[in-house]
């Protein structure tokens, strides 16, 4: 997978074990024995950190379409309002005088123009809000993935500690089976302590 700017690239469990336990001199076989204790992070979660992901493109398209429809309806309404007002102003020109009718038409044009500019401005704010929503979602996904990755690293270090990999004498190291039994006992003890 090629790196996409702003996208978090996935790290496999094997690569993470190599980064953290490789310096301890463990062989690939030994590291693979411990890999069963470390959870994988689904690649779909990593994909959500990419601003060009399909889910964001679809959301962006749907929201822009909704805004465009609203803007079109607003402009159509303003156009109809302008034509209706022009007809009324022409009728007033004959009855109340030419000057007063022209003044009314000028006021109506300015009012409708101002409402049109407000609608255009609301459209621009809507586009900005769409992008901000996507940026916020991507930020939340990145935080979530960073938390999961930190937990994986912590789990690896805890497993290495429990297995005795950090002891200076290296005389005894817990096997993966012994480690599994130890973790299960700790979880049962914790459940008992908390009354679960």
Image (spheres, rainbow, N blue to C red):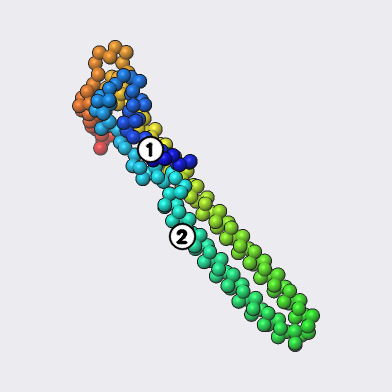
Task: Give residue 194's mark.
Answer: none
* Percent coordinates x, y for residue 159 in the rendering: 30, 26
Circle 2: element type:
helix
* Percent coordinates x, y for residue 112 in the rendering: 66, 70
Task: Give residue 10's mark.
Answer: 1
Tell me, yes or no, if residue 172 can be seen here: yes
Circle 1: element type:
loop
* Percent coordinates x, y for residue 94 in the rendering: 75, 87
Q: Is residue 87 left or right of residue 173?
A: right
Question: At 33% from the left edge and 26% from the top edge, which residue is drawn?
Answer: 18
Where's the N terminus, which quadrant?
top left
In the displayed structure, 184 sits above or below 63; it is above
Query: Which residue is outermost to the top?
Result: 169
Residue linked to disc 2: 62
Q: Nearer the viewer, residue 134 or 47?
A: 47
Mark 1 touches mark 2? (CB < 8 Å): no
Q: Residues within 10 Å of mark 2 (few under 14, many from 20)?
A: few
In the displayed structure, 89 sits above or below 141; it is below
The answer to which of marks 1 and 2 sits earlier in the sequence is 1
Q: Nearer the viewer, residue 2 or 126?
A: 2
Q: Residues within 10 Å of mark 1 (few under 14, many from 20)?
A: some
Q: Nearer the viewer, residue 49 or 27?
A: 27
Q: Quadrant of residue 33?
A: top left
Work out how far the residue at label 1 is from the one at label 2, CA to CA, in angstroms: 29 Å
In the displayed structure, 87 sits above or below 27; it is below
Tell me, yes or no, if residue 189 can be seen here: no
Question: At 63% from the left edge and 67% from the top edge, which residue is drawn?
Answer: 116
Question: At 66% from the left edge and 79% from the top edge, which residue is drawn?
Answer: 85
Q: Is residue 40 left or right of residue 184?
A: right
* Percent coordinates x, y for residue 9 in the rendering: 41, 38
Q: Is residue 19 left or right of residue 118?
A: left
């Amino acid at each position: 997978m090629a790196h996409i700017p702003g996208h978090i690239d996935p790290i496999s469990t094997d690569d993470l074990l190599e980064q953290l336990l490789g310096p301890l001199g463990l062989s690939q076989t030994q590291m693979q024995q411990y890999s069963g204790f470390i959870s994988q992070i689904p690649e779909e979660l990593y994909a959500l950190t990419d601003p060009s992901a399909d889910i964001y493109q679809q959301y962006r398209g749907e929201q822009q379409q909704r805004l465009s429809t609203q803007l079109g309806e607003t402009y159509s309404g303003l156009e109809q309002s302008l034509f209706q007002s022009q007809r009324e102003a022409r009728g007033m020109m004959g009855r109340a005088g030419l000057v007063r009718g022209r003044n009314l038409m000028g006021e109506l044009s300015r009012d409708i123009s101002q409402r049109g500019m407000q609608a255009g401005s609301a459209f621009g704010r809507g586009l900005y809000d769409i992008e901000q929503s996507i940026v916020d979602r991507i930020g939340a996904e990145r935080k979530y993935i960073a938390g999961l990755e930190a937990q994986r690293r912590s789990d690896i270090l805890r497993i290495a500690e429990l297995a005795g990999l950090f002891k200076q004498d290296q005389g005894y190291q817990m096997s993966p089976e012994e480690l599994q039994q130890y973790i299960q006992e700790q979880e049962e003890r914790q459940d008992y302590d908390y009354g679960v």
